[in-house]
Image (cartoon, grey):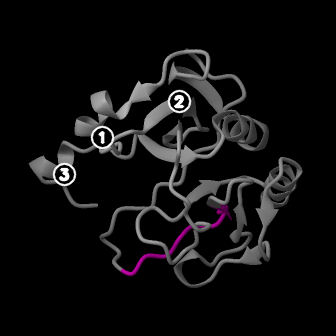
Amino acid sequence: MSTPSPRQANFRGIEHVGITVPDHAEAVKFFEDVFGAEVMFSLTDKSRDPLPASALGPKNGLRSGRKIVAVSTMRFGNGANMEIFEIDQPDDQPRDNIANLGINHISVTVDDIDAASDAFAKAGGELLEGPYDLSDQEEGRGNRGRFGFTPWGMLIEFEQLPAPMSYDNPQASERLIPDPRKATEEV
């Protein structure tokens, strides 16, 4: 791996991914039930005043007349955190798919793709074909994948990756694959 430039060294990695959902409570429960995600804090919820576009729009682009009615940051395994938003009067948007511009899905590393698929379906997710063996640079014994839609239509990919990746450039950085969480972590 090459030494990062000063500009590259300033960036550590993805801290969180923001997801806007039609029902905050449903999404939080879904991520808790399927992935064991935990709410760390909520900037507002439906028992408190919403966060208006007049205050936030200049900072984050929230459209005029809109309000964030609930937003929570969740700890998601030992990868990036997630920020779950419910915004009043969201635009009607088609179901996310791999062809959409912008963030079209998140991928979650799992130890047991069959158990992850079962938990996903039991929590109301719609599974697509699979699990299937991964191919090309992701091919390896036990490397499998699967996609599914959350109850509100967000696309999530599961990847079980026990075998190492192959890389086009042997000098390239290795792909980040979160280590398994320890049952008892030292604080």
Near mark 2 (Cα within 10 A), the count class, few <14, some 14-19 or many ≥20, is many
Q: CA distance from mark 2 to mark 3?
A: 36 Å
Which quadrant would the C terminus be assigned to in this image?
top right
- Residue in the image at 52% along x and 47% along y: 19
Q: Which residue lies most toward the left here?
A: 6
Residue closer to the observer: 166 or 78? 78
- Tell me which secondary structure the magenta stretch mostly adopts: loop
Tell me if residue 159 is in the magenta stretch: yes
- The picture places residue 30, in percent across and down from the top left corner, at 74, 41
Residue closer to the observer: 99 or 80? 99
Q: Mark 3 is on which residue type?
A: Gln
Write down the quadrant of residue 108 in the picture. Answer: bottom right
Q: Which mark is residue 60?
A: 1
Residue closer to the observer: 173 or 35? 35
Closer to the eye: label 3 or 1: 1
Q: Which mark is residue 97?
A: none
Q: Secondary structure at mark 1?
A: helix
Residue under pointer 3: 8
The mark nearer the N terminus, 2 or 3, is: 3
Relative vertical location of residue 119 with respect to residue 85 in this rendering, above or below: below
Q: CA distance from mark 3 to mark 1?
A: 24 Å
Residue under pointer 2: 69
- The picture places residue 90, in percent across and down from the top left corner, at 52, 49
Relative vertical location of residue 100 with respect to residue 55 in this rendering, above or below: below
Closer to the eye: label 2 or 3: 2
Q: What segment is highlighted magenta in the picture?
A: 156-168
Q: Mark 2 is on which residue type?
A: Val
